[in-house]
Image (tube, rainbow, N blue to C red):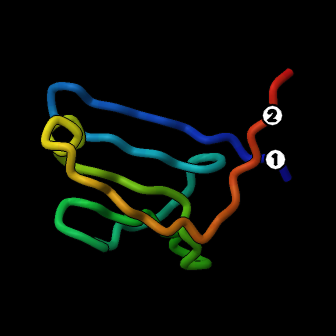
C-alpha cells in the first residue's frame, strides 16, 4: 500500500501537522512540550505528528527530534 504524506501548516496558529495516509479517526499523545504523535484509534499505530509553535522553534534553531515508527516511501513520477 502506498501512502501519501499530507502536510498542513497554519501560519496564524504556527501549527504544523504531518499525517500519513487517508484521514482516519485518531487521538493525540504529547511526546514532548508542544509535540504530539497522532495515533490511530483502533490500532494505536502512529499516523502523524503535530508541532505547535513550529516557526518559533525554527527561528530559535531548536531541534525537533522525533522517531517515526512508520516508513515513508517517496517516489517521483
User: For mark 1, does the 10 Å Cα neighbourhood hold few (<14), some (14 to 19), or many (20 or more) residues?
Assistant: few
Asked if the residue under mark 1 is in contact with the one under mark 2, i.e. CB atoms within 8 Å, the reply is yes
Res. 59 image quadrant: top left
Residue 10 locus on image (x, y percent): 27, 30
Residue receiving disc 1 = 2
The quarter of the image holding the C terminus is top right
- Position of residue 49 relative to residue 73, above or below, is below
User: For mark 2, does the 10 Å Cα neighbourhood hold few (<14), some (14 to 19), or many (20 or more) residues?
Assistant: few
Q: Is residue 63 left or right of residue 14?
A: right
User: Mark 2 to mark 1: distance in Å?
Assistant: 10 Å
Residue 73 locus on image (x, y percent): 76, 47
| Picture disc at residue 75 | 2
| Picture disc at residue 34 | none
Q: Nearer the viewer, residue 31 or 65?
A: 65
Residue 67 locus on image (x, y percent): 49, 69
User: Which residue is painted at 32% across and 56% down in the image?
Assistant: 64
Amino acid at each position: 500500500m502506498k501512502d501519501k504524506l499530507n502536510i498542513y501548516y497554519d501560519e496564524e496558529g504556527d501549527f504544523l501537522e504531518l499525517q500519513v495516509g487517508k484521514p482516519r479517526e485518531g487521538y493525540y499523545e504529547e511526546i514532548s512540550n508542544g509535540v504530539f504523535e497522532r495515533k490511530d484509534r483502533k490500532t494505536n499505530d502512529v499516523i502523524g505528528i503535530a508541532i505547535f509553535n513550529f516557526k518559533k522553534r525554527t527561528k530559535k534553531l531548536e531541534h525537533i527530534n522525533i522517531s517515526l515508527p512508520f516508513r515513508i516511501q517517496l517516489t517521483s513520477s
